[in-house]
Amino acid sequence: MKLITLAGFLCLAVSAMAQTVHFDYDRTANFNGYRTYQWVDQRTGLGIDQLTDQNIKRAVDQQLVLKGLQRVESGGDLQLTYQTALNHEKQFNAFGSGPRWNGWGQVNTSTIEVGKLVVDLYDPAKKQLVWRGDAEKTLDIKKDPDKNYRNLEKAMAKLFKNYPPGSSKK
């Protein structure tokens, strides 16, 4: 019995270590000036249902609140979007301003790997991306929903450890 328990803990440790995060940011952005954020409703990623969308936003919200940011419905200092892939996918990322993206806009393409979650933070005043982070091996709809959410929470805690830039000691 002890051998089975030990094997279980080792499997958990290996799976936790396998989850990797990356981030990059605009080195000219004043991250101390950002106090509020809003979600820009952009469902990107095939297979993402409303519950998964809510879970992703909830896990990100938890981390941003810990960083001192407040979620608002409009007029945020930052605008957030995310992209996911449950399969190897080509993504078309659009960002803009105004009702239904009228006005200015930008479209980029990228390939998202299986189970990856990418979170983008845009500065609407500068009209540009200021922070991007991704967590690999984060999403798996085949897992138990509670285990999947705990995995998502851990991944977002690990990812936002690096926000704002320079806030974590390596």
Image (cartoon, rainbow, N blue to C red):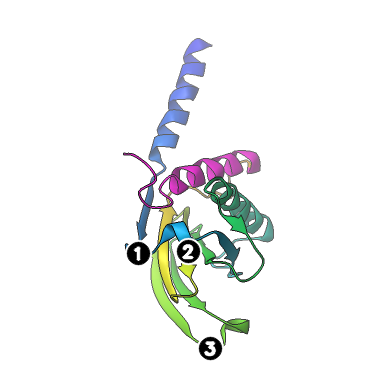
Callout 2, which amino acid?
Leu
The reply to whether residue 82 is visible in this rendering is yes
Residue for point 45% across, 70% down: 91
Above or below for 5 versus 135: above
Q: How packed is label 3: few (under 14 Cα within 10 Å), some, or many (20 or more)?
A: few
Mark 1: secondary structure: loop
Asked if the residue at tag 3 contacts the one at tag 1, i.e. Cβ–Cβ closer than 8 Å, the answer is no
Pointer 1 residue: 26
Q: Position of residue 36 (x, y in %)?
A: 57, 61
Cα–Cα gap, marks 1 and 3:
23 Å
Residue 134: which disc? none
Q: Secondary structure at mark 3?
A: loop
Of 147 and 121, which appears nearest the observer? 121
Q: Amino acid at mark 3?
A: Gly
- Asked whether 158 falls inside the magenta stretch, the response is yes
Up-down: is 99 above or below 122? below
Task: Report x, y in % for residue 145.
Answer: 64, 43
Quadrant where the C terminus is found in the figure: top left
**Segment colored magenta:** 145-170
